[in-house]
Image (spheres, helix red, strand yellow):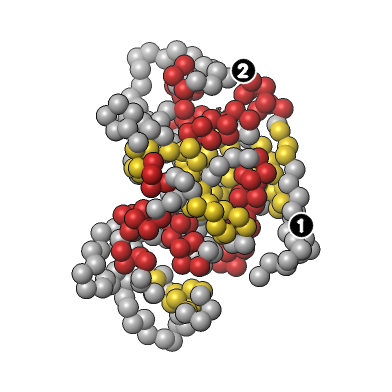
């Protein structure tokens, strides 16, 4: 538990370079495409090379496997222990919501992090990363004013100050999936070890044919009325927001069973403490992974983590 009188220090540090960059950047998405941004400094190559998603990818991880793809390559030092992972993620999401509130930017919990919130308002103990969403106006504000800025956070528990880096993908202006290499619009990254919050913007990509439907670049689609008005809640002890219709959103993404299954990833839901507890090694796992309840579809089962 966090001490009641924790004190939070958030310092906004603008990088001079990012400021001058932003001010010279036109903001309307129609007049600015990522290719013009990326192409700016490059010699005009001919003939046009074939598309290469890896070359275009903005956010990099030290590796593509389970152990390495949760770190931002720029801040990765080593694979963290389980304890450090949980501690980092808990403070990361706290700092994230405190920072966004401080900046006056609307944001809410998404994907596996929303499922985590659903159970007990805390991160899942086996989780590796965190997901949030913003509107496309929010994304524009992030890009314009807060791209490549640092935030300091202090718990008041004697732990040294923690620092976070907010970075916005230049491809954030492109709202369709493109080559799929840049579906994450922004990241809030722990400078200490590279673990991060993935931030994605939701926009009405097809207002003429699909009005009221907003989507991210990974083709997750939502009706405006499923997201708004956002519900006020708490996550890891700080104020946070969740989509209005979080149950249908969760069952659509993770199936009905995700909301009732009480064993997952070597953990069992403990009713009295409302916590996911690690199942001791010598105990038999009754409900195997992938097991479903009668009448519950198993679509996408096991994908949440
Ligand atoms: C954020 O800043 C970096 C460095 O200046 C730049 O490469 C990137 O394009 C910026 N992002 C946006 C969305 O403008």
Residue at the spot x=75%, y=61% of the render? 6
Q: Residues within 10 Å of mark 1 (few under 14, many from 20)?
A: few
Where does residue 196 sit, x and y in percent of width and height?
55, 50
Residue 86 percent across, percent down from the top left: 57, 64
The quadrant of the image that shows the N terminus is bottom right
User: Which numbered circle lies on residue 7?
Assistant: 1
Q: Is residue 201 above or below residue 156?
A: above
Answer yes or no: disc 1 within 8 Å of ligand 1.
no
Q: Nearer the viewer, mark 1 or mark 2?
A: 1
Label 1, secondary structure: give it.
Answer: loop
Say which label, 1 or 2, has the lower sequence index.
1
Residue wearing tag 2: 24
Q: Quadrant of residue 262?
A: bottom left
Q: Residue furthest left?
A: 295
x 59%, y 40%: residue: 105
Judge from the rendering whether residue 296 lies leftward or rightward of residue 102; answer left or right: left
Q: Position of residue 227 (x, y in %)?
A: 42, 46
Image spot of residue 151 (x, y percent) = 69, 44
Quarter residue 300 falls in: bottom left
- Which quadrant contains ligand 1? top right
């Amino acid at each position: 538990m966090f001490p009641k009188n924790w004190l939070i220090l958030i310092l906004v540090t603008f990088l001079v370079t990012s400021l001058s960059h932003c001010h010279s950047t036109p903001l309307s998405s129609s007049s600015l495409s990522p290719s013009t941004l990326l192409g700016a400094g490059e010699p005009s190559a001919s003939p046009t090379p074939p598309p290469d998603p890896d070359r275009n990818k903005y956010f990099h991880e030290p590796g593509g496997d389970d152990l390495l793809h949760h770190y931002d390559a720029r801040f990765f030092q080593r694979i963290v222990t389980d304890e450090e992972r949980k501690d980092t993620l808990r403070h990361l999401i706290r700092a994230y919501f405190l920072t966004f509130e401080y900046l006056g930017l609307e944001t809410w919990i998404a994907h596996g992090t929303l499922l985590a919130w659903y159970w007990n308002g805390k991160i899942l103990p086996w989780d590796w990363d965190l997901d949030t969403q913003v509107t496309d106006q929010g994304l524009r504000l992030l890009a314009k004013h807060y791209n490549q800025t640092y935030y300091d956070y202090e718990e008041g528990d004697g732990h040294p100050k923690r620092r976070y880096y907010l970075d916005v993908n230049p491809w954030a202006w492109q709202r369709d999936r493109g080559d799929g290499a840049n579906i994450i619009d922004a990241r809030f990254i722990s400078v200490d070890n590279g673990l991060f919050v993935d931030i994605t913007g939701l926009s009405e990509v097809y207002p003429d044919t699909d009005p009221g439907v907003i989507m991210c670049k990974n083709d997750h689609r939502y009706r405006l009325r499923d997201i708004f008005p956002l519900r006020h809640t708490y996550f890891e002890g700080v104020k946070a927001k969740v989509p209005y219709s979080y149950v249908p959103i969760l069952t659509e993404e993770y199936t009905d069973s995700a909301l009732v299954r009480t064993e997952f990833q070597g953990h069992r839901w403990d009713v009295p403490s409302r916590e996911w507890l690690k199942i001791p090694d010598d105990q038999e796992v009754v409900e195997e992974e992938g097991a479903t309840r009668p009448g519950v579809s198993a679509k996408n089962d096991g994908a949440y983590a």
